[in-house]
Image: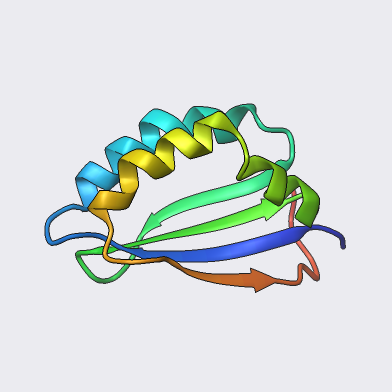
Amino acid sequence: MTGYALFIQHRTLPNGRDEVQAVWRKHMQPAIQANPAHLAYFYCFGAFQQEICAFQHYTDAQAAAAFLKTPDYANYLAEVTPLLLGEPIVTVLDVQWAKRA
């Protein structure tokens, strides 16, 4: 199995999870949907009220790096950063197997 995956955990400001989700839907959802290098993407609320998690599976590390340089990502980052409690926790994963839809 090939691919490059990330697990990302964000913490929002108190009671800010819905606002962060709205910013994500505005910028990221359409960009991810249109990006063929995203093999899978799961946007999830965590167990805690301020937690948002995302699992991203890309074709390769270069595709992930390229996505971070897009105008859509830059616009998302500018709008969402003031709504978050610090930097996200990012875990890089080595994909061993994946079920395709």
| Quarter of the image where one finds residue 84 | bottom left
Residue at figure coordinates x 51%, y 27% from the top left: 30
Query: Which one is in front, 79 or 8?
Result: 79
- Seen in the image, is 54 located left or right of residue 32? left
Residue 52 vs 69, above or below: the answer is below
Residue 40 vs 24, above or below: the answer is below
The image position of residue 100, as x and y in percent, is 74, 49
Residue 45 vs 38, above or below: the answer is below
Q: Is residue 101 visible?
A: no
Residue at figure coordinates x 26%, y 65% from the top left: 85
Residue 30 vs 86, above or below: the answer is above
- Seen in the image, is 23 located left or right of residue 59? left
From the image, which quarter does the C terminus lie in?
A: top right
Numbered-mark total? 0
Query: Which one is in front, 3 or 87?
Result: 87
Residue at figure coordinates x 21%, y 46% from the top left: 18
Q: Residue furthest right?
A: 1
- Seen in the image, is 51 located left or right of residue 60? left
Residue at figure coordinates x 70%, y 50% from the top left: 65
Q: Is residue 27 visible?
A: yes
| Quarter of the image where one finds residue 21 | top left
The image position of residue 35, as x and y in percent, is 67, 32
From the image, which quarter does the N terminus lie in?
A: bottom right
